[in-house]
Image (spheres, rainbow, N blue to C red):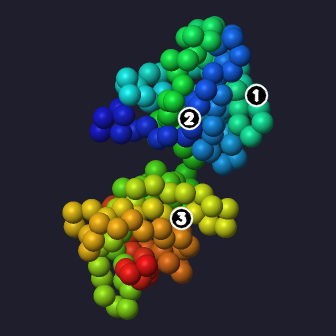
Amino acid sequence: MSAESNLVNVGRITAVYGVKGWVKVHSYTEPQENLFEYHPWFLKSKHGVKKIEIDDARPHGDAFVAHIVGVDDRDLAMQYTAADIAIERDLLPELDEGEYYWSQLEGLVVFTQFDGKRQRLGVVSKIMETGANDVLVVAGDAGSIDQRERLIPYVPDQFVLSIDLTVGEMLVDWDPEF
């Protein structure tokens, strides 16, 4: 397994903050401040992956601001914007039976068992948080019944019937015409 495949995105640096090298940070963790419990961070950008340490952070509006060790001016901090924040997968806490991290669901092949007929809908390309429940974005692929993108509510036992991480599949009860 490559080092990068062991990394899980947990946030994003969105902008610079001030003139002393601070950056604005958006957390994907729940609760959001848990992002700062993980060390070290790996920044993933179009230029590759870089390991960094944070020496100070605080809430700012609906996000956070943080200071990267060794980054003490705005121009240097600018190089870190639009980078995903990742951590090593084994730093994440163990989940209870039937619970999954989004990173485990992304990439699963989705089949529907609608009206007793099994059909491939595509692959989970991402997951959206909507408030009421999360929504799976399933993109059609070469093996699916069509190339449509489908939005399927992530509601176990109602729409999501089973998940098999070993095989890399999810079974849903979803009308393929929807």
The quadrant in which the N terminus is found is top left
Q: Which mark is residue 135?
A: 3
Q: Hey, what amino acid is under mark 2?
A: Arg
Q: Position of residue 119 (x, y in %)?
A: 29, 79
Q: Is residue 163 above or below residue 104?
A: below
The reply to whether discs 1 and 3 touch (Cβ–Cβ < 8 Å) is: no
- In the picture of the structure, the residue carrying the numbered disc 1 is 58
Q: Residues within 10 Å of mark 3 (few under 14, many from 20)?
A: some
User: Residue at the spot x=50%, y=57% of the render?
Assistant: 127
Residue at 50 percent of width and 78 percent of height: 159
Q: Is residue 69 visible?
A: no
Q: CA distance from mark 1 to mark 3?
A: 30 Å
Mark 1 to mark 2 CA distance (whole Å)? 15 Å
In this view, the residue farthest toward the left is 142
| Residue name at image x 69 percent, y 11 percent | 19
Q: Which amino acid does the dot numbered 3 rest on?
A: Val
- Between the residue at mark 3 and the residue at mark 2, the CA separation in whole angstroms equals 21 Å
Amino acid type shown at disc 1: Arg
| SS at circle 3 | strand
Question: For the residues carrying marks 1 and 2, which lies nearer the camera in this image?
Answer: 2
Q: Provide the residue designation for mark 2.
A: 12
> Dot 1 lies on which element?
strand
Number of other residues with Cα within 10 Å of mark 2, as a class: few under 14, some 14 to 19, many 20 or more: many
